[in-house]
Amino acid sequence: MARLTTDVIVSAALRGAAGCGIFASILRKGDERAGTIFVEVEKSPSEMRLLARQLNYENEYEWVCITGEGWVSHADIQDRLRREIEYDPDCWIVSVQDKEGRNIFAL
């Protein structure tokens, strides 16, 4: 079964977010076919988290918070993203500003 390309997945999530009244934008465009997706979720200026899409043991994608269980600062997010970009320069970064802290890819 063919998988959707990353650019299609991101575009669909942005349209879904707009339909729910959630502001979301692309901060970094990566490989259009298979780039890793990172989602920077901002609940408030001091409460953020970073999500990544990863394959699980059943070979299905799931979203994992890679900054721990709690909310972290903007500086922590930027530091982690800097390291991720060094490791994978073809990654996508999507920014979400939502007071409920929702992941637009899981709506």
Image (cartoon, grey):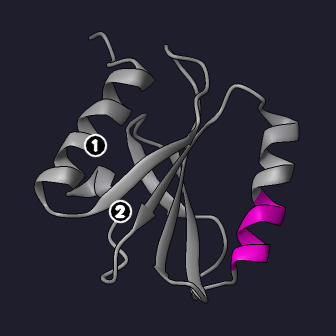
Image position, residue 102 (x, y; %):
32, 70
Picture quarter containing residue 28? top right
Residue type at mark 2 is: Asn
Crowding around mark 1 (Cα neighbors within 10 Å: few <14, some 14 to 19, many 20+) is some
- Residue 61 is tagged as none
Residue type at mark 1 is: Ala
Q: Is residue 55 visible?
A: no
Tell me which residue sits at (31%, 31%) in the image: 11
Region in magenta: 74-80
* Secondary element type, mark 1: helix
Position of 20 relative to 32 (above/below):
below
Position of 25 relative to 28 (above/below):
below
Is 78 magenta? The answer is yes
Tell me which residue sits at (26%, 63%) in the image: 22
Q: Is residue 19 visible?
A: yes
Tell me which residue sits at (51%, 16%) in the image: 32
**What predominant SS class does the magenta segment belong to?**
helix
- Residue 103 is tagged as 2
The quadrant in which the C terminus is found is bottom left
The residue to which callout 1 is attached is 13
Position of 55 relative to 31 (above/below):
below
Is 100 magenta? The answer is no
